[in-house]
Amino acid sequence: MQISTDVLVKIARLAALEVGGVAEVTTGNSQNVRGLLGRTGLSKPVLVEMEDGVATVTVHLSAAYGQKIMPLCEKVQENVKQTIQNMTGITVSRVNVIVVGLAQPETQD
């Protein structure tokens, strides 16, 4: 049985979004700059690399304003790893979380 890395990317994205305090899974504003430089492979918000049947996942996200960043990243790492392993049986060796921005707090009218 073969599971596409595209499926793993979707699982990782949804698992990251399940964690409270994650505003969005995104590469941030630098995506346009990378696109201009022609390095489009770097502009994906979630990257999954497979080596010998073991996955390494990198998730780029924006955190909600006011969140403690380190505990948030640890929760994302754990949820992404557990969700992929539970749904697919594929071992995840590591989950890299890169915080690329902060979501603006909601303004009160």
Image: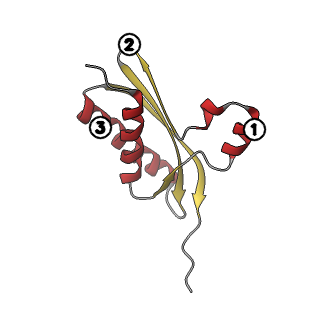
- Element assignment for label 3: helix
Quickly name the residue at label 3.
82
Quickly name the residue at label 2.
52
Q: Quadrant of residue 83?
A: top left
- The amino acid marked with disc number 1 is Leu
Quickly name the residue at label 1.
36
Location of residue 68 in the rendering, given as x and y in whole percent from the top left corner: 49, 56
Q: Is residue 96 above or below residue 52?
A: below
- 10 Å neighbourhood of mark 2: few (<14), some, or many (≥20)? few
- 10 Å neighbourhood of mark 3: few (<14), some, or many (≥20)? some
Location of residue 61 in the rendering, given as x and y in whole percent from the top left corner: 53, 48
Location of residue 103 in the rendering, given as x and y in whole percent from the top left corner: 57, 61
How many marks on residues?
3
Q: Nearer the viewer, mark 2 or mark 3?
A: 2
Whether residue 77 is visible:
no
Q: Is residue 41 above or below residue 51?
A: below
- In space, the residues marked 2 and 1 are separated at their CA atoms by 33 Å
- In space, the residues marked 2 and 3 are separated at their CA atoms by 19 Å
Q: Determine the residue positioned at 66% across, 43% down.
A: 31
- The amino acid marked with disc number 3 is Gln
